[in-house]
Amino acid sequence: MFLHIQFDSETPIYQQVKNQIIRGIALGELSLGESLPSVRQLASDIGINLHTVNKVYNQLKLEGWVVIHRKSGVMVNPDLKANKSPDYLAGLDTLLKNITAEAYLNGVSREEFIDFIQKNYDSYKIREEK
Amino acid sequence: MFLIVFLLYLITIYIPLVLIGIFLPLLMKKTLLFGVVIPEELSDREEVVEIRKRYIRNSSISAIFISIVINIFAIMFQSMDVLLMGIIVLIVLFGINYVDVHKKAKTLKAEKKWTIDKKQMVVVNTSKPEEEKNSLSYYWGLPLLIMLFTFLFTFVQYSGLSEEIPHQFDIVGNPVSYRQTNFWNVFLLPLTQLGISITFYGVYKILQKAKISIQARRPLASFIQNQLAKKYWIVYILITNVVLNLYLAYIQLTVLEVITPTTAVNVLIYGFGVAIPVIGAIYVSMKTGQSGNRIKVDVAEEVDDEIIDRDDDQHWKWGLFYYNPHDPTVFIEKRFGIGWTINWGRPLGIVLVLGTIAIIMVSLIPLFR
């Protein structure tokens, strides 16, 4: 999978990498159990500090998207579990509050908004394959 | 006599070097103008083409002028040293011409604000390119075998050698100087083979690890081109290693006075030893271009005009030397020219370059002594 990192973006680089890896997993572009480049390799390919990549991998690990083995390195979590915890849902609600408010004020209708969400959901296939 | 040597150098080293120096810009990626990042679609603009023309015009005029002077001196003094020094002068000359247009390109880019409203993108591939554990790695036994043969053969002959062995030869293969028979003098060439083989194998390993530079506009195509270009260069250094070891083995046989070749054979073998590496390098350069951009690949990709490669000009001094201590990359593709260079911001890179230079120097000493 190709990661596209925009250097002059407002989104920090670590956030871009993290977002794209999570989305890559949902889209099936990264398969479960697929190995990811080592911290050094990825930092070198992008041309950034080791710390930045470390931060990405640690967060992805904490959230359960990847596993890090001392021997075989970093890989996409082979048995990804749905983690619909109350905490997560609360976070999602906060996130949507901001996004929907902005969309509403910008004149995006309810139908249009739901349409966006549906399109995205349609492209995530990994659960159906199981 | 001198004329034969002179012509050999002229044809196998001098002329190819001048041609590469002049026409190198034509092999570069469209996103780089003399080491300066530019948007791809501007590559054919008048002012950009003008800069390329300026380089080709200036470098060809100055190179041809200097070459004529050097060659006249070389013939006048009947000296090969003049010709060899001339090569260094030429390299400096091309360097000066390059820096001139590099600065022009930089100024032009700043004036026109070409990169201001573009998205600067770096694309990386998270899937590992298939590690080249293919059959090619076995072929590295070939130069090794030639070297071992030379060592063993020399070892067997050692006791039967006379008190002095030939050390330097003229082009027709007549010894011009002799050295005392001792370990170092006798095993000089096999040891040189060893040095060359280690260096080339090291380069092969480095090439496998070197960073793959993906163009943000066409990630997949440029990724494939890059992989293919690497493969071409790996085959090239392997063949060059074999040729050089064979060449040194041949010279060793004449040192041990096992064979006494005729002029024709000698000239032919010299030509083989020098021509294959030089012509090979030119051939592969023409074939791949910078980062493999001349290799045709059949990939359909959507091209977004808003995207350009990351503008990291500030890390590239004159577009030649990469210095970025925040980037853990040690080996990186050159901005101008074909091949790889190091990140001067990494201690490991500096150590490796100095080490390589030391090895080359040590292996070259016997050839010039």
Image: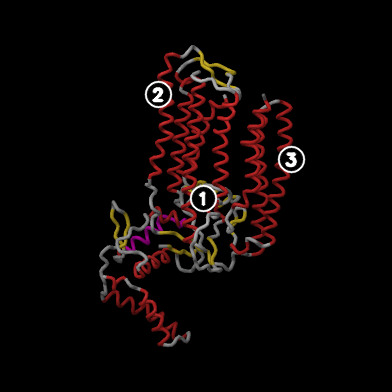
Magenta residues (range): A46-60
Same chain assignment for discs 2 and 3: yes
**Residue shown at the point (47%, 46%) measured from the top left:** B346
Residue depicted at 48% across the width and 26% down the height: B189
- Residue with the mark numbered 2: B152
Picture residue at 48% right of the left edge, 84% below the top? A106
Q: Main secondary structure of the magenta part?
A: helix
Mark 1 secondary-structure assignment: strand
Pick the quarter of the image with the C terminus of chain B: top right
**Closest to the observer: B266 or B75?**
B266
Q: Which residue is mark 1?
A: B333
Residue holding disc 3: B65
Q: Position of residue B141 (x, y in %)?
A: 39, 36
Q: Which labelled disc corresponds to residue B154?
A: none
Mark 2, secondary structure of its residue: helix
Q: Are marks 3 and 1 in contact (CB under 8 Å)?
A: no
